Amino acid sequence: MSEAGAGALQATSRRRRLAIDSPVVLKAIAGVLLLALWEGVVRAWAPAYVARPTGIARVFAAVITDPQFVAAAGATLGAVALGLTISLVAGTAVGFAMGRIAPVEWSLRYYVNSLFATPMVAILPLLALWFGYNGDTRLAVVVFASFFSIAINAADGARSVPAEFLEVARAFRARPLGMLFEVIVPASLPYLIAGLRLGAGRALVGAVVAEYFVSIPGLGYYILYNSRTFRHDEAFVGVLVLVTTGVGFEAITRWLTRRFLPWHRRT
Amino acid sequence: MRPQRTWLRRITIASSLVLGAVVWQVAGQFASDAFWAPLSATLASLVGVAKSGVLLRQALSSFELYLAGLAVAVAVGALLGMLLARVGWLRVALEDYIMMLYATPMVALIPFILSIMGFGFAPKVLVVFLFAVFPMLYNTIEGARSVRPELVEVARSFHSGEWRLWCDVMIPHTLPFMMTGLRQAIARGLVGMVAAEFFLSPSGLGQMIMMGSQNFDTAGMLAAILLIVLLGVGLMDLGRWLERRFAPWRAYQP
């Protein structure tokens, strides 16, 4: 909650004499209104199969306890977690090498930057050819989607380590590994978190797109299959799981930044 | 930087690019045709489609889709963001929902769009729009939140009208954030464009990649991918340039 928002809110409620004095109440009212708008629009104009809040609420419990759905969600989120871990380890290693060793930076810069700018969807058919129409392709897409944002941020972080830190460490005869884990990693932590946050969002998109393309069980395929068979309410529960995951990543990285790096205001 | 080092740098960059091209070529000669095509074949295929006019037609089709979606997204994102910037209670009411949609992987909505709107141009524009609009909106709101209430109060106490308030306080403070939003929208819109061309009715550069992969024309597929990579790099540079141009004190931060 921002002070600016609260200030404006107080001013408004004073002026309008509406007793909406709590932002939480205001947000809740807005949420209910948005849901009602969605429900009303779908009921009035859309075909009967289109997802709407009451329909989703009706099927929610059944879908979320359906073993098939649980397995699909587990497969997708598991692949995202595994792929992100691979990207985090490999991307940080490559990024640190680029940030601290000039020739590495010179020789990799164009490749890393251009693959970072590439929409990962475009590479999908190629990766499907290489890894086959199975879970390996999804993992490869997740890694490809997240690796470069993590590497680029790790390189920026390693480059931004103040020279004084390194001089002091050298003066105390720190070993290379000590230098890495006790100076470079902590100093570039805000960048690593920013890279992870960006990479996590892309990884989630990558996993869903890969499932559309190679038709393997997972949340993306669950959504695709159910919406094709006009069961939009069921399919939308899958979307809700993805939204929760996306928002969860965002919340976790924000919390990490605030908790461990309070001096770093915005990433 | 010492001149010797500059030379070393140039030589390293040049040799890494040459090495990449050689590896591409050699890998293409040794790998099966289905997996990888030599650089020479890829470039030949690129020249082929360029000469036959297919490339121009498909690129224009992609471009039309991308620009339509991006333009609507930027207009809606900026205007709605500006509205929320001034109307505090509306912003407080909606900002969490907008943050939620910003974090939502929009690809998840493609099957619904396909099943409700079917094939055609409009659903694809909607996909590009959905990919691009939330970064724009989200960042504009972040910018509005960063305008300190004291500034508005000072302006008010000097009898600033709404117009002067916008020119002197709101826009200068919000614009840098909007440029960050625009950079993100440019990048996400491109992902949306390819996704729409893949999963809705095939068209444009996305269709070229698809056809290449379905016909085992690996060189053709690589040629189209290479184009998209170059397009992505160019658009990202454009985004960063815009951000630097309008907000030099907020140059590229991830």
Image (cartoon, coloured by chain):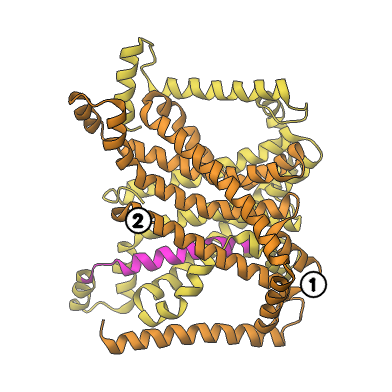
Tell me how far mark 2 sits from mark 1, CA to CA. Answer: 44 Å
Reading the image, the residue beneath label 1 is: B216
Locate residue A255 relative to residue B151 in the image: left or right: right
Identity of the residue drawn at 77% across and 41% down: B118
- In the figure, what tint was chain A given? yellow
Q: Residue at x 28, y 87 (%)?
A: B3
Question: Which of the two labelled residues, at mark 2 and mark 1, occupies the earlier sequence position?
Answer: 1
For the stretch drawn in magenta, what is the main secondary structure?
helix
Helix, strand or loop at mark 1:
loop
User: For residue A144: magenta?
Assistant: yes
Q: Considering only vertical position in the picture, is B203 above or below B212?
A: above
The residue indicated by pointer 2 is: B245
Q: For the residue marked with disc 2, what is the amino acid?
A: Arg
The image shows residue A189, relative to residue A219, as above or below, that is: below
Of marks 2 and 1, the one in the foreground: 2
Q: Is residue A85 visible?
A: no
Chain B drawing hue = orange
